[in-house]
Image (cartoon, helix red, strand yellow):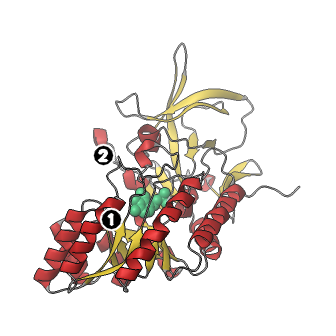
Amino acid sequence: MSKAKLYLQYEKQKLVLGPQKKALFSLVSNYQRPTYVYDLDILKERVQIFQKALPGVQVYYAMKANSHPQVLQCLHSLGCGLDVVSGGEIRRAQECGFKPQALIYSGVGKTHKEIRQTLEMGLEQINVESIPELRRIAKIAKEMNKKTNVVFRLNPDVDIETHPYIATGLHNNKFGMAFTDLPELKTVLKENSECLIFKGVSLHLGSQMHNLSGFRDALKLLRPVYEDLQKEFPSCDTFDVGGGLGIFYDTQEIEAEEKLLQDYANIVFTELKGLRAKIQTEPGRWLVAHAGVLLTQVQYLKKTSVKNFAIVDTGMHHLLRPTLYGAHHRVWTLNEKSENGTKKYDVVGPICESGDFLASDRDLSELQEGDFLVIGDVGAYGFVMRSDYNLQDPPEEVFL
Ligand SMILES: Cc1ncc(COP(=O)(O)O)c(C=O)c1O
């Protein structure tokens, strides 16, 4: 039987990362503080697999997932554009060599200043999230005597069975616009045809999609809407299917993730077959999550009547996902086994909140104070969500 494909695994009992099996223990000799460790080989491999599965579809990486310059430069070299959501992200994208024509601007709260910046630079497209936003864009564009491409982010009210905080395609979410908004949106377009160029529709149903039936339903709902809009607005030529493809944090089944990608691609090509449209996609997590791990050191081992706590020097201030979403990240010791067998641990941080945990009830080799642990699959929505709560120092970031 062939060995399962893994990005984080033991090789000769030592923990290694990526296709080239780079050893992680080499990092501990100079250890100063918790460290996000990235492997760009993983990122490159994921992008290439994604692009191959979706030929002809332009990838706009959702840079909110990980906006480290080296990550962005790597994506740039592979021909990706970016999905940006703030003036800060636009600046970072520019610094990393992205042309304005490679940027899609999403987000529900675009300020006057950010819209002005967008129009000044001539970004490829603005994904509009509300009627007042479209009116604001039109007003500013008129004042500046500029024209801009706009795409309507539609909210199809479809459930993708994910954590409620990362579901975005339901009517009780703040994202996108209902189909019933279309008559007014069309009026605004027509009233402002000298500055608004209508390009098409977009959707983003949320993150960590594993069951793709909601995604299929959404494309079925949006297709006829797009076709009707295209009849009325000949400039309409863009269909943005959003991001959200899930990964398997608990098992790290890479082959299953690649199969999920294939199913996703089949849905896109089946549901949009024959449509006159440039298809765009905005993946974040699927591309970058496996490319990062977080190295941390055990400070104390604390035993209570019901728990063994491993208190480490990182926590919710460096990796918020477990606290925010109850997210599961696998925890690894640097060596495969200690002679002393395993024990159940709660891996927790130094922050003064009981919600400050990284993992609960995990079987790990018996730990000693000073041991190192590695938290897996933190390349997406890891470092970018850090805070300085409790005035803790930030984590470091290094590339292997
Ligand atoms: C508009 C938009 N596109 C794409 C993404 C990327 O999602 P994911 O990282 O799940 O692929 C997000 C994530 O929040 C988003 O808000």
Task: Find out if the beta carbon at label 1 lies less than 8 Å from the nearest ligand 1 atom.
Answer: yes
Residue 366, x across and y down, in percent: 65, 30
Residue occupying the far right of the picture? 1
The numbered mark, 2 or 1, whose residue comes first in the sequence reads 1
Q: Is residue 334 visible?
A: yes
Picture quarter with the C terminus: bottom right
Above or below, 371 against 383 in this view is above
Q: Residue 88 falls in which quadrant of the image? A: bottom left
Give the secondary structure at mark 2. Answer: loop
Distance between mark 2 and mark 1 Cα atoms: 22 Å
Q: Is residue 97 visible?
A: no
Residue in the picture at 46% in, 66% down: 222
Residue 52, x across and y down, in percent: 64, 76
Label disc, if present, on residue 388 of the rendered structure: 2
Task: Find out if the beta carbon at label 2 lies less than 8 Å from the nearest ligand 1 atom.
Answer: no
The residue that disc 1 covers is: 85
Residue in the picture at 73% in, 38% down: 337
Front-lying residue, 113 or 186? 186
Q: Is residue 276 left or right of residue 258?
A: left
Q: Is residue 398 left or right of residue 98?
A: right
Front-lying residue, 337 or 45? 45
Q: Nearer the viewer, mark 2 or mark 1?
A: 1
Identify which amino acid the numbered label 1 is placed on.
Answer: Val
